[in-house]
Image: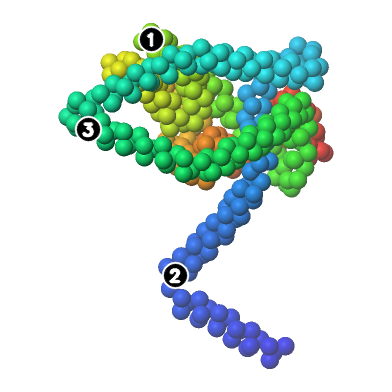
Amino acid sequence: MNSNEPRARHGVRSAEEVRAAVPYGLRVGAAIFGRLLIVAGGLALIGYVAVKLAAVLVPVAVALLLAALLAPTVSWLARKKLPRALATAVVLIGGLAVVGGVITFVVITVTAGMPELIAQIVRTVDELRTWLRTGPLHVSQGQIDGMLAQLTTTLSRNQSVIASGALSTAVTVGELLTEFLLMVFCLIFFLAHGGRIWTFLLGAAPVRIRHRVDLAGRAGFTTLAGYIRGTAAVAVIDAVGVGVGLLIVGVPLAAPLATLVFLGAFIPVIGSVVAGAAAVLVALVTGGTLPAIIVLAIVIGVMQLESHVLQPFLLGRVVRLHPLAVVLALATGLTTAGIIGALLAVPLLAVLSSALRNFTAVAPEPDATTVATDSTGAGDSSRRQASA
């Protein structure tokens, strides 16, 4: 034993000498960047799996968004002694009826207004051609005919590409229909058995932190519900404001453009800009410069009302995200997953932020005699098991 002690002490001294030989800043930097590499690798793995399973994860995510919007209505009907399955069916059928009615109204409006729009576009093209000939550019008729001929030749050369694009569009429509059915299926169970599903998932968490995970999950879902309801209210106000302005100015297709504004409001920052630009462009093509300027002023006014009054009042206390974080999340989602990524990025960030805040906070231990009720109205048996 005595012969081993010097060797051990020598080993300790060697380790200390090696540690002392490495500069302190290098040790700290290696520790920090090593952990960052591990986190980056984990995020890359999660992103890879999410891309591969996008056809499944996106419908589930959209179903969660709709469940956060519709769950309070289902819970209210359940508190009125209506069976939860029947309440879910009533809410889903009512929601589908509203969506179907809006789509039907938009289609009828587009069908009725499209001939006038096409005629106005033809007149605008003729006016543009006249301006090209008589305006400051002085483009000759031969040059205009040459540009049109070149456009026709380009289209004829790319007929196969257009045909393959149409075929891929048909395949995409089939995939979207399948994902829509999956979304509806998930939504039904989220609304009818959301509490039981959450209890089952909560069982995977260690017992020691299960209560904190429960609080974090419920806080995240509450934030998601508040975000969706607030965004829906903002979208309705934006659509009504822009739609009424378009009707007053006399711009055709006011209802479809208002619907586009409503949908664009669910994509922060860029959604309203794109929808407003479409409204201004239609006004410019159909009415000229003055109506376009008036519509532009209406769109800017509505966007200012949204950013300075509606969002701080309806979303500020719920989301609590810095504008820079919103823009970065939006850019990341748009870059990685397109429109779907832009739609889901900010809600996901809000849920994660709320869940982490509540998970890291000091939470009281659950009372064994209390049975919690979640936002979908189901009892939480996991709390009773953890306290027992």
Q: Nearer the viewer, residue 151 or 267?
A: 151
- The residue labelled by disc 3 is 139
- Mark closer to the chain start, 1 or 3: 3
- The amino acid sitting under disc 2 is Leu
Image depth: mark 1 or mark 3 in front:
3
- The residue labelled by disc 1 is 250
- Residue 154 is left or right of residue 40, and the answer is left
Q: Where is residue 302 in the image (x, y as percent from the top left)?
A: 39, 19
Marks 1 and 3 in Cβ contact (< 8 Å) = no
Indicate whether 112 appears above or below 365: above
Marks 2 and 1 in Cβ contact (< 8 Å) = no
- The amino acid sitting under disc 1 is Gly
Image depth: mark 3 or mark 2 in front:
3
Marks 3 and 2 in Cβ contact (< 8 Å) = no
The residue sitting at 52% across, 25% down in the picture is: 263
- The amino acid sitting under disc 3 is Val
What's the CA distance linking mark 1 and mark 3? Answer: 33 Å
Crowd around label 3: few <14 · some 14–19 · many ≥20 (10 Å)? some
Image quadrant holding the N terminus, namely bottom right
> Do we see residue 188 in this rendering?
yes
